[in-house]
Image (tube, grey):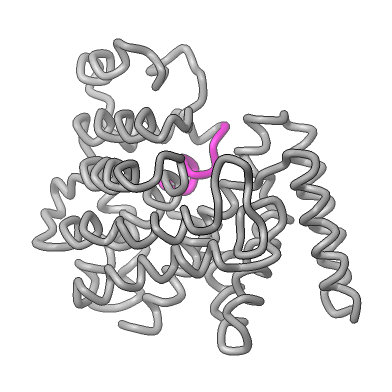
Amino acid sequence: MNVNDIVKLTQIASALEVSGYPKPGNVHRTRDYDDMVFEDFVISGIVIGDAVREACTDVDVENPRLGKYILDAVAETDRWIHNNTNLGIVMMTTPIAVAAAISDSFDELRPNIVKLMANTTVEDACDLYDAINIAAAGGMGEVDEYDVTSDSAKDELRKNNQTMYDVLKISASFDMLGREMTSDMPIVFELGYPTYHELKDKSLNEACVMTFLTILSQVPDTLIYREEGEDASLKVSMMTKDLLKFKDDSDFAEKLAEFDDYLFDNGYNPGTTADLTAASILVSNLKDHF
């Protein structure tokens, strides 16, 4: 696929994700947080373009340097926005975009993501750790083994020959993004993308919100899990599932707005679900352009 198209589709996916409203618990076009606002996310989606373009140009499948390009995108974002607005989105969309660059058809996209992830290196892992620390995200969690917050983490990675795939596999037990990136992206390809693709011709906003809700209803959000605990993450997913029972009712919009207010007021931010939604939008848009 044409690299310029991939860049634009990646930027578009980021912009459409944050524009979806009311996307419960997240920053969106009618909801800001004290420390980050809607415009931060729009800017973030634009400034990653150069990193995506470089990642998708003359791809070396045996050493795609995914970690480097994730780091480049996060570092460039940090130049413009001093918040972690898009680490998760960049982590998810980078392998998808690079896979698109080496694929001749949509059917090749998912297998090529698996191939690229399998070919990540120790230096990719070190670059990913740098990206996480720039974003101040703690995205790998605080664990005894290869703790991303440890000063010696990268030395340990090199000593034990731990690739980016390896460290994401370690985090897979407690982080949805790690699980997706090391297991064929089942949430994106089997849940998120089909939902978005079916609805987007009717309404891009509805497609985004319903994709977000569908994922959240079936997969407890691991950002909520890390910040508020397992019970909170399970409760939010159950509430989302209950909400979707009323999706065809005339007062669904009102119920959705109330749910958004509830999550915001209680500090429940399904940020990982937003990352998966952006990736699902990108996959859907790529399908239309192969």
Q: Position of residue 142 (x, y in %)?
A: 51, 19
Q: Is residue 254 left or right of residue 284?
A: right
Image coordinates for residue 219, horizontal then vertical, percent: 67, 50
Pick the front one: 12 or 238: 12
Residue range of the region highlighted in magenta in the rendering: 174-182
Q: Is residue 177 magenta?
A: yes
| Dominant secondary structure, magenta | helix
Q: Residue shown at 62%/84% (left/top)?
A: 203
Look at the picture and state if 272 lies above or below 245: above
Give me the residue at 34% from left, 76% from top: 106
Q: Quadrant of residue 154?
A: top left
Q: Residue at x 57, y 82 (%)?
A: 200
Q: Position of residue 231 (x, y in %)?
A: 79, 33
Which residue is more in the foreground, 256 or 126? 256
124 inside magenta stretch: no
Residue located farthest toward the bottom when viewing the structure as drawn: 202
Q: Quadrant of the C terminus?
A: bottom left
**In the depicted view, which residue is nearer to us: 15 or 206?**
15
